[in-house]
Amino acid sequence: QSIGCDDYLGSDKVIDKCGICGGDNTACKVVSGVFKHTLTNLGYHKIVEIPEGATKINITEMSKSNNYLALRSRSGRSIINGNWAIDRPGRYEGGGTMFTYKRPNEISSTAGESFLADGPTNEVLDVYMIHQQPNPGIHYEYIIPGDNVISPQLLAHRRPGEPLNGQLGMPESTNHEDEDLHRETDTLTGQSAGTFPVIQPGRFPSHQPENQVPAVQPPRQNREYNWKQIGKTECTTTCGKGSQYPVFHCVNRITHEEVSESYCDSSTKPIPEEEACNLFPCPAFWDIGEWSECSKTCGLGMQHRQILCRQMYANRTLTVQQYRCHHLEKPETTSTCQLKICSEWQIRTEWTSCSVPCGVGQRTRDVKCVSNLGDIVDDEECNMKLRPNDIENCDMGPCAKSWFLTEWSDRCSAECGDGVRTRSVVCMTNHVSSLPLEGCGNNRPSETTSCNNGPCAGKVEWFAGGWTQCSTECGSGTQQREVICVRKTEGNFDVLNPYECSYLEKPPSQQSCYLKPCGSKWFHTEWSTCSKSCEGGFRVREVRCLSDDMTASTQCDPQLKPEEKEPCNTQDCIPEIDENCKDKYYNCNVVVQARLCVYTYYKTACCASCTRVANRQPGFLGRR
């Protein structure tokens, strides 16, 4: 018979997901979900918070990606993949439990990264994703205890039938010693009453059977013996800060000879306290990461791996500067790789017959990409630059050739007198699928023939001369030509008045022309009116750089830019002379100095001087 989790033979009790023997999975709560948020910024993004006391922790990437999972404590200590340093897969301690970090590296694998831990955690932990490409989804799941849940740790240490936190018949009245015990238990576990207490093994009072004989108390130990520190345990590490504990033995107080521990009072034995040892740092070492996927699926490729200089201290591995590892040969970070032999091109058939019986045609053959196993695969599996031709031209020799002619044109080129009629002549093979070829011989049929619509005597018509050169060397310009009305006689032309040809359509005497683009050029408006009519003003205009299509440009030469402002009307001002406005006295300047021009008498007697002051032109001499 099998033994159940309650240690009874024949019991079928098992531990449920909450860790309770014979439980019904209701004493705890499963927290799970999927983080599917779309992220934009590269770097660390928080995914989920793992609370204190969580068990059965599973953080898994839903599919393979270039992202990484990261874990750190609420205090800010990095546990896995912190500070932009990617750790190797393995086991990492953090939050009071051991995390297993997995990162499948097989090319055929589609599984993503994962963190797994049994728990329970003793602090809050934060899970992050180092975002580098679209998030494939992160599945998270953990178990937390429910309200008033019995501790799985307590169940693991109790014996069958033993009281469990007063639930199996604890007496109603407990002495102060029991109260102190419960209080001490709460203190040891770091939890307040009513919050999932953890009872340490051996600390809970057990009920002895009534028929059990009380154990004989040992006699009081002799004071001739006491506890003495005789040394220390070995340091847990040889470098990088380890720990050790003092060792106490029972000795004779007089001879200091070691004796059995039964001679000393066990209640007075000092509790060994942890001491730091070997504080000097360990030598730095190269931490070698796993090889990346091969850069090519077939043939010779490259793969890379991360090499970090790391150093152990206080049970933590830290990334340090690379010069600390200079005493060691640095491993290679790149290597060649070949997953399989590449597929190759194979010619499966011979060339077909030429598509034409004569002349130039085409022929084809079957070319396939074949894997190293002999299977036909997509062309992309082979090197397209090395693909043999599967189509080419073929020349079957000259075909019989003949001249092909059109009918003569209906109209003569001249309305009167001598002219010509035309037709098209082309040499072609008599094979309908071939292109026009040369080689019909030198006796090419004529393409023109003469014609005459009768004499031109007395006929009036417009006569146009040749076009002149374009008015501009670049850009848009115009061309001119002379158009005159003439009468054609036998061998002569008489110039007539244009009125004689008015019933005929007159050819144009002007046309636009365009030789080449000018590029960008400076354009400007007309000058504005001068700001002053005399004694120096200024005038302005707007200057712009425009391209050939009259849009704004920045390609004009700044040194050739026309001025946008210039002086104007720099001559002296000559006021209009009023013959009735004159000074009647030679000393009118005294009137001005005395400011008497405000009086009508003086304004009339010294009209010229007072007018100059009024116009703010002192010192004017009255030049004509």
Image (spheres, rainbow, N blue to C red):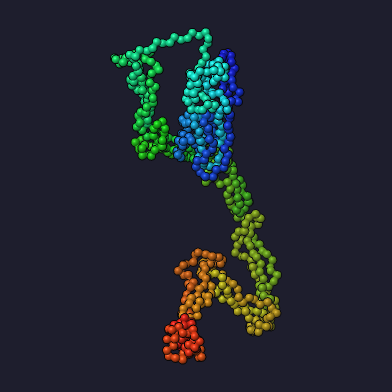
Of residue 428 and residue 567, the one placed in the foreground of this image is 567
Q: How many marks?
A: 0
Of residue 506 and residue 263, the one placed in the foreground of this image is 263
Counting from the top left corner in percent of width and height, residue 505 is at 68, 77
Residue 338, can we see it? Answer: no
Residue 568, above or below 188:
below
Q: Give the image quarter of residue 285.
A: top left
Which residue: 58% across, 48% down? 391
Residue 430, above or below 546:
above
Q: Give the image quarter of residue 332.
A: top left
Residue 600, can we see it? Answer: yes
Of residue 203 and residue 77, the one placed in the foreground of this image is 203
Which quadrant is home to the N terminus? top right
Counting from the top left corner in percent of width and height, residue 335 is at 44, 38
Residue 23, above or below 304:
above
Which residue: 45% across, 69% down? 559
